[in-house]
Image: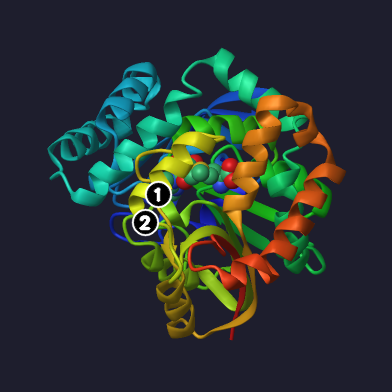
Amino acid sequence: MHKRIINKLICPNSQSKQLQVHAIEALRNNNIIHNIYDENILPDDDIKTGFIFSTDKKYIYFIYEYIPILLNDQDQDSAHLNQIYEWIKNSIPDEFKDAVTANILRIRKANESTDGNWNREEMKYYDAAVDTPQLRDKMLNSIQRENLWRIFIPRKEKMINHFETNCKGQWIFEIGCGNARTVARMFNPETFNYNYIGTDISFKRLMVAKMAIPGSDFIQASALNIPIKNNSFNGAISFGMLHHLPRPAEAVTEVNKKLLQGAIFSYHEPVYTSRQFSEKQSAIVRKVFRTYDHSDHDNKINLKESLAALKEANHQIVSIVPYNSVFRVVFEAIINRFYKSWQKSKLVMKSVLIIDNILLKTIVRLSNKLGPQAIIVVSKKL
Ligand SMILES: C[S@@+](CC[C@H](N)C(=O)[O-])C[C@H]1O[C@@H](n2cnc3c(N)ncnc32)[C@H](O)[C@@H]1O
């Protein structure tokens, strides 16, 4: 975590803005330096190991592998925290030792909450696929090489275009960034010269994200409790994550708090519509045509509710683009089975999206059962 972002963060337990940072190890001009106190850390130092602390030292949050764990007590994963504590405990300066121990004990005793359990299930699921350095390297390699045009094209054309024009020097955050593949490939902060913070509940996905975009910052945080200062960001973006939450509309409200007037928020999500497959039919479609894995909390969002949350937050809808993911999934399943490399062709994937659009405007209109199954929403805070 670069020291420069500390002024953008708040404590996820107390919401306090008075945070400081201690670096056990920090990267400065490609060299690792050790044990630096807050006042001696430079804005561009990237803290590899250390902790963020509230001025009274009541709340302490570890930074490990450049990623601060900014979760409230109920959301923390004690096993992960204990592991990090074991690795760093001998390097913690004496004046912080008692406070760190008190924090670990408090978190261990924290009451279980439904959201906390839900979040830990998500962490576990998304951590598992990148549990080892080898698996993380493999995922990094795939992010860097694989052209996922089926998601890159609509995200670039219908979402990122709204941010690109004026983004220089601005602050934009992502919720549920996972390995940050779309941003790394289509809206790289290093190319577009803006400040990006990626947040996700899965620590290990964030490790991959940090390898993909080393100049940016990634925070382990819940989308329902975003540890970012209110009214401080010029934009927020989210790709396929709201539908993993117990209450997606609440995240819309939470994101809005962090945004400045005029900021753009955009998300890409599967939606419940009035014209819906039954649960049983959906399960069959997913089983037969499933092309990628999702956690048990994979759901759909209620578009009406999330639009109402945007309206409540004084957002003006800039655009809502529908997609028919049923057609896309069927198509992908077929090409995956017969000729996977077609999926890497921008032209083929662009054609799929065009056919999808034609189907949406014709057959889907006449059917009670088909889409639109996914949408891209762009809104502006008034
Ligand atoms: C389907 S993945 C999408 C990842 C990424 N946005 C992409 O396009 O590849 C859903 C992501 O949501 C994250 N997630 C689930 N619950 C979350 C929560 N409460 N707060 C933040 N992220 C969460 C998961 O860890 C996972 O990375």
Q: CA distance from mark 2 to mark 1?
A: 5 Å
- x and y percentages locating residue 278 in the rendered image: 36, 56
Q: Is mark 2 within 8 Å of ligand 1?
A: no
Q: Residue furthest top?
A: 134
Residue 342 falls left or right of residue 322: right
**Residue at the spot x=59%, y=57% of the render?**
173
Q: Residues within 10 Å of mark 2 (few under 14, many from 20)?
A: few
Residue 32 falls in image quadrant: top right
- x and y percentages locating residue 224 in the rendered image: 37, 58
Residue indicated by mark 1: 281
- x and y percentages locating residue 63 in the rendered image: 45, 35
Q: Is residue 96 above or below residue 200?
A: above
Q: Could you tell me if the residues under marks 2 and 1 are in contact, i.e. CB atoms within 8 Å?
A: yes
- x and y percentages locating residue 244 in the rendered image: 41, 50
Q: Is residue 57 above or below residue 205?
A: below
**Residue at the spot x=79%, y=33% of the render?**
342
Residue 90 falls in image quadrant: top left
**Residue at the spot x=40%, y=20% of the render?**
91
Of residues 173 and 303, which is closer to you in this image?
Answer: 303
**Residue at the spot x=45%, y=36% of the render?**
287
**Looking at the picture, which amino acid does disc 2 mark?**
Ser
**Does residue 2 show up?**
no
Q: Residues within 10 Å of mark 1 (few under 14, many from 20)?
A: few
Q: Is residue 146 above or below residue 162?
A: above
Task: Check the picture and name the quadrant holding the N terminus.
Answer: top right
